[in-house]
Structure formats: C-alpha cells, structure tokens
Amino acid sequence: MGRSGVIGLDIGSSAVRAAEVDVKKNPPVLTTFGQIMLPPGAVADGEIIEEEAVGATIADLWRRVGFKSKKVIVGVANQRVIVRQIEMPHMEEADLQSSLAFQVQEQLPIPVDEAILDFQILEEFTNTDNERMIRLLLVAAQRDMIESLLRTLDHARLDATVVDLVPLALLRTLGDANTTMFESGFAGTADGAEAIVDIGAGVTNIVVHENGTPRFVRILVSGGQHVTDALATALQTTSEEAEMLKRQAAFGGVPDEAKRIIEDRTNSVLEEVRGSLDYYSAQPESTGLTRVVLTGGGSCIEDLAPRLASATGIATEYGHPLASVRLGALGLTPEQLAEAEPLISVPVGLALGERQ
C-alpha cells in the first residue's frame, strides 16, 4: 500500500493487536486487522517482561495476517509513563523543545535524565497578572522501559516510527466530535467534558477531553485480567477456565460463587475509575463531565456501562471506534467485527496519528 498504509501496534497485557489504515483516504480506510494472544506473563500491567517471547508473538502475527510493512506506530501505557498538565510562561515551541528538561525537572518524580520527554501544547492564555502563559500536556516515559519496547520490536524485525501514548490514540477514534457514534444514536460530543475509559486486560486508560483536546489522563493498573485472576485463585482453577467463566457470566448459568467474585472484582475496577473521574472533577479548572465512553476488551463484562453510570452518576455508553474509519475488505463476518470492535480503538487510533 506504500506510505498511505500505516500500521498501529497495540501490545496489551494479554494480546497484541495491529491495524493497517489507509490514512490518505477521506475517511481513512481500515484495510487489515489482526490479533494474537500472548504467552501468560510475557506482559504484566502493560510492561513487557519477556522481550523475546513478545517479539516472537508479534512476528507470528505479521506472518499470519500478512502485514507487508515493517514500520509501525506503537502504543505505550503503564505505570512508568507520567502524564501531567502543566502551565508555564509563554515561549515558542522550538524554544520549549530545547529547554523542556530544564523547565519541568522540578515537576517530575523521576530524574529527567532517566526519562524521555514529550509534550503537546493545549492552549495559550493570559493569567491574572496579564502574563502570557501556555498550558501543555507533558509526557515522561522512563527511558529503560522504552528501550525494552524497542528491543522487543527488534526481535520481531519491526521499526517504530513513533512511540505514542495510548490515551491519545483513543482520542482519535472516540474523541472526534464529527465521527463518533454512540448507542443513543447521537453523534459527537455533548457540551462539557467527556471521559473515554478503555478497560484492557491489565491496564485501564482514562482520558478526559473537551472536543478532542485532552484535559486529564490517568493510567490504572487494573482491568479484566484481574477479574480472571481472582476467579482462578478462589475457584482453584486455570486462568483459561476462569476466563471462560467470566465470559459465560453474561449469558447466565455460572455458579453463584463465580458470579459473586466477578461482581466484586468488577466493582473494584469501577471504583478505581470512579475515583479517577472524581479527582478530575475536583480540580478547580475542570469542566463538568457529561458522558463516559467505554471501550476495550474488559468493557464486555456484563452490564458494565449501566454499572459505571450508577457508580458515577454520569451517562455511560459503549463507543464505536469503527465509526471513525471506512471498512475495507477485512474478511470478517458481522459477528466477528462486532466482537473485535472494542479491541480496535487503540491500534486504529495509533495509525490515525499519521494524519496529524
């Protein structure tokens, strides 16, 4: 496909997923999607533990799906990534780029020489003293974690053209006021702020935005795998059998003890999400939240949207990331496509970063 075909690679805690998008088309065209499970323990809480095993799994995905390009935009989200919104005196972007480490070193919990820094200028404003200011989103990723990610891609014989933040990828697929369609049939963002909550196996990403501009980002080490692990431990069964029980719970017929464990552990995940949204709302500069959008494999747990709406008091709906692209010949049945949609938000959003 040449340069118009961009591949977004999402290395999750339980699987790797990749999507190829023709970004030169309008709307962009999703031409290929594939996923493959990771060996247990190869990735923990979003961080790569076994580089060679993960690299081999990615290489297997490339062979099975038939991706031709070796260049990818890869996402990162774990507890070794720090994301903060900060304010500072106005300066030109080039000057900020060259002096960023000096400017932010007092605001980070890690030494700046151990971090890879990036930023996005959100807005310019004048403070109460009539001074020109800028507000930016600062990202600091621990250098050794990024180096491990790049070594993993080397094992798969891939090159990362960009290492991107997963919450920003989510904004591209679910935060576009012109393309996002919700269960209610309403397209776009309501007045006020909106939270996108991506519940994965080991990591939950939360990004609050106003019409696509990020206002708050939080990465939680919590997700669907923690529900599975709790089931496996309590019932003294394998992780595979526990995962099957968790999926079957939506259709009934699981033992009462299993149902109770799933409900209790899911409530713990939802409480962490609610706590993060409460923290955002308590900030003096926050805008009222009007909606929560759910995505990710963990969002498929039974009745998760109404349960989160009940916990937060905020309208909650399942997002449809495929509304941001046109579908090519994916070779998937409508049932397979519906099953894949909650998993596709991140890799498609990573690929769409090439349009910016």
Image (cartoon, helix red, strand yellow):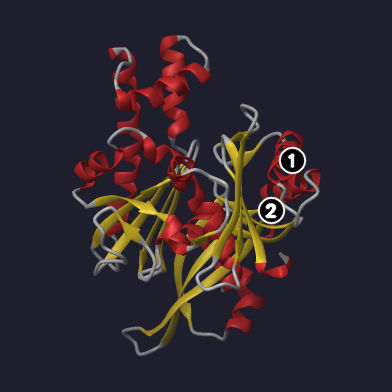
Regarding residue 135, the answer to whether it shows in the image is yes
C-alpha separation, residue under disc 1 versus residue under disc 2: 19 Å
- Give the position of the N terminus as an image quadrant: bottom right
Q: Position of residue 328 (x, y in %)?
A: 56, 58
Q: Residue furthest top?
A: 236
Quarter where residue 123 is shown:
bottom left
Who's the residue at 24% across and 55% down the image?
A: 184
Who's the residue at 59% across and 79% down the image?
A: 96
Q: Position of residue 249 (x, y in %)?
A: 34, 23
Task: Out of 167 and 132, give the one closest to the viewer.
Answer: 167
The reply to whether discs 1 and 2 touch (Cβ–Cβ < 8 Å) is no
Above-or-below relation of 315 to 190:
above
Disc number for residue 55: 1
Q: Mark 1 or 2 closer to N-term?
A: 1
Quarter where residue 112 is shown:
bottom right
Above-or-below relation of 186 to 226:
below
Q: Residues within 10 Å of mark 1 (few under 14, many from 20)?
A: many
Look at mark 2 in the image and give the residue it sits on: 143
Disc number for residue 174: none
Q: Position of residue 182 (x, y in %)?
A: 31, 56
